[in-house]
Amino acid sequence: MIVEFAGPDEGTAPLTWGQRAIWEAILHTEPDDHYFNFDRVVKVPGDRSVPEVLAAVRALVERHGSLRTRLGARREPYQRLERTGRLPVTFGAPAATRFDYEREWPLRVGLTTDGDRVTHVTLLFCHLAADGAGAEVAVRDLRMLLLGRPPSAPAPRALDLALWQQGEQGRRVATAAAAHWEREHRRIAATMFPTPAKGSDPPIWRALLHSPALDLAVRSIAAAHGASTSTVLLAAVAELAGRHTGQEISAVLPIVSNRFRRDTMAVVSTLAMEGLFTLEVGLPFAEALRAAGPAALRAYRSAYHDPADRAMIVRAESARRGERVHPHCCFNDLRFADPGPAACEPDEIEKARAQTTLTWPLSQDNLDCRFCVHVTTEGVSLTADTRYLSRPDIERYLLDLESLLVETATA
């Protein structure tokens, strides 16, 4: 099936800061860059036929320019918004293979049917077009279109955001963020994981820890210390990364949504970028948590930055030291809602440890990171390069993370 669309606008612009950041990650991950694809499944309300659903998909693509924007060139990349085009739609789940960024639309659509009725729409996103929060905006609008209630306000455009970022106001924001990156790069070690190991085949592995005890412990610690569960997890991840590598200052790159401004809240684009979080290692965890709150806020502000500024800072600091400076240590809280602080009895937390499981859901050849913790509703996962952190060490790290949090909550 083909959806022919005709949007209200077209044009070209530089990549936004978020697009440039994810593009660099894609280049370092190819040909395994399908790793960055992600999907959303939308339940179709009522009895909607295939033509009715295709009409809603067409309206979605016409409304959000990012969904009809392709990469202008690989060597000197820019974004190219097209007014018209033809979007293929399949029955069943769309293929999760890597995108052709210059030729393919950054959205794949699949329909699930029951007879003549469409029951679900699967949207597979290219990460150049949207991040998780941007995809939720698209999903919300598709639901409204399926109900026959199209959004009235025009959608904000990634092209306009790119131009703002290059302007005077954008440069002021970027300069403030660059000051944080420069100051912290003077303090941190060259990398969090400097010691090569033999590695597995393939070298990149992910372990997933499903731990109800960890979840309860995190909420209980957050309640006791007046913190968010995300800050508790970020502090614990940084503390243990420092312990495992013997670093005095732990440097972690949290992935931040960057949707704090009014002009970024509702845009379908990729805004999520890395901030720089640092934490002194070896303090009692309660004391580390007190320091983690302000440090997390500084890290979140630093995430809305110009990647060109950051690259310049990294080059200068690497030249000063005579070695490349990069933490290679990421933290990504992918939950859309913080479950919130909640006191919990120690016995209940300890009892829940019997339900802990650890599985290995992913392996591949390339990844633009040596160590990346993801937090989802399924649990806490660690994706790591086994040439720097072996599979036994990956497993030990996650179990130590559970122990640190449970012991802190039940002390």
Image: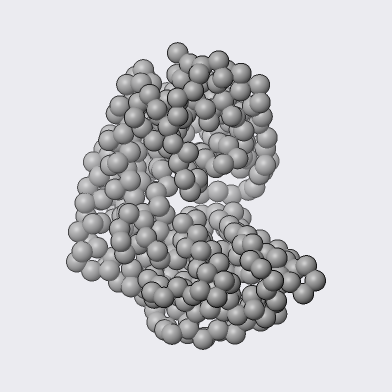
Instruction: Tally the marks.
Output: 0
- At which x and y percent is residue 329? 45, 39
Q: How did the renderer colour the structure?
A: one colour
- At which x and y percent is residue 302? 30, 48
Q: Quadrant of the C terminus?
A: top left
Evaluate whether residue 272 shows in this view.
yes
- At which x and y percent is residue 377? 57, 41
Q: Residue at x 62, y 36 (%)?
A: 207
Who is closer to the viewer here, 87 or 378? 378
Question: With 366 as the anchor, is 320 left or right in this view?
Answer: left
Q: Residue at x 58, y 75 (%)?
A: 57
Q: Quadrant of the N terminus?
A: bottom right
Relative vertical location of residue 96 with respect to residue 218 in this rendering, above or below:
below
Relative vertical location of residue 213 with respect to residue 159 in this rendering, above or below:
above
Q: Residue at x 40, y 58 (%)?
A: 271
Q: Residue at x 48, y 83 (%)?
A: 7
Relative vertical location of residue 229 with respect to residue 18 in this rendering, above or below:
above
Q: Quadrant of residue 120?
A: bottom right
Evaluate whether residue 23 shows in this view.
no
- At which x and y percent is residue 244? 48, 25
Who is closer to the viewer here, 133 or 203? 133
